[in-house]
Image: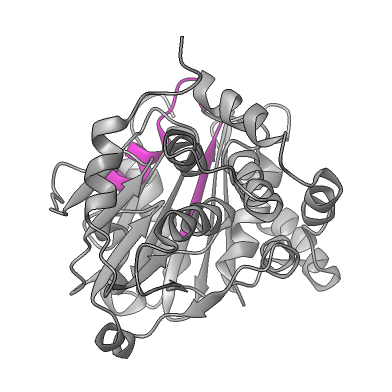
Amino acid sequence: MAYFRQLDDEMTHLISLFERDNKWLIIINADPDAMASAMALKRIMSRRVDSCDIASINEVKRPDNLAMIRYLRIPLLSYSPEMKNNYTHFAMVDSQPHHNTAYAGISFSIVIDHHPPHPDFPFSSNYREIRSDYGSNSTIMTEYLYNLKIRPGKLLATSLMYGIKSDTQSFERNFCDVDIKAFSYLNKWADTPLLKKIVYSEYKKEWLKYFSQAFRKMRFIGREGVFVWMGRMESPDILVILADFFTRVHGLSWVVVCGNCEKKAVAVFRGDGLHRDMGAFSQILYADVGSAGGHKSMARAEIDLKSIETKDVESFFWDRLVKRKPAGF
């Protein structure tokens, strides 16, 4: 029995897209899983195309992500629409074209993702694989390397391990047996002490004040839910950290943490993954006014502040949450 899926036809198709004069840009919404996946695709393209760069539509601010970029030497550019003129082909990993308005107007030749597809947002590409049963996109890319007989170097293997660890929250969120196999396989090549350095770089000292603010502002919903409005924030990553923290509180099974970040209203959803689908929940609440979606246990909504009629954004989030909340939440 093969260790991973046998992807002979798929890899033949993928490799056929690469020509010597191609200039590729891999565009991502940078987080550990996306950065690791992009590095793996870049490795697959090496020596097959003229050039390949990685660009992020978001600014990386979380200290663990910055540590990942530094220690694993990830050459990440900041994406701007003008960059399109410098490349002939575009690829996307760990995302889909409808996930962010920054992707608009880009014709992606490759889309590789593990988030559930949305029936209202179909898209076409020369090569596409969506594996929503996988816990991380890094697992898909590990399978690709294995099928292409490419042994990942120390830094790439460490990147992919951290991508899997991050997106499955150390196998506490949704994952499948292939995620475990990939993590085990990569462990042979990865630098474990380097991985620990990245993992232990999660918080900045100046972020600690936000925890006390969140405790003061939290509003309980029923017996198992909590809503937190944080107001204007320097980074949506802080909302993610707070939401992850509240999932560790006994008696809470779901949480919504909201705030304003860079002209957008952002809501981060977390759940226990047992009974409630947070991805579907986020779409019910906010998909009609912005982008929303995710997994059963984790989701996100982003809304342009201009799309919100009232200036009281906290009331906007709260009123929709209370009025549209499905029975059982």
Residue at 72 percent across and 70 percent down: it is: 70
Q: How many numbered marks, from 0 up?
A: 0
Whether 276 is among the magenta residues is: yes
- Vertical order, 228 against 255 (above or below): below
Q: Is residue 308 visible?
A: no
Task: Tell me where residue 5 sits by quadrant.
Answer: top left
Q: Position of residue 29 (x, y in %)?
A: 45, 64
The magenta region covers 267-285
- Vertical order, 282 against 318 (above or below): above
Whether 167 is among the magenta residues is: no
Residue at 60 percent across and 46 percent down: it is: 152
Q: Is residue 64 visible?
A: yes
Residue at 82 percent across and 73 percent down: it is: 206
* Residue 318 appears left or right of 243: left
* Residue 270 appears left or right of 161: left
Q: Position of residue 283 (x, y in %)?
A: 30, 46
Direction top: furthest residue: 1
Q: Position of residue 209 (x, y in %)?
A: 80, 68
Q: Position of residue 127 (x, y in %)?
A: 21, 49
Residue at 36 percent across and 33 percent down: it is: 132
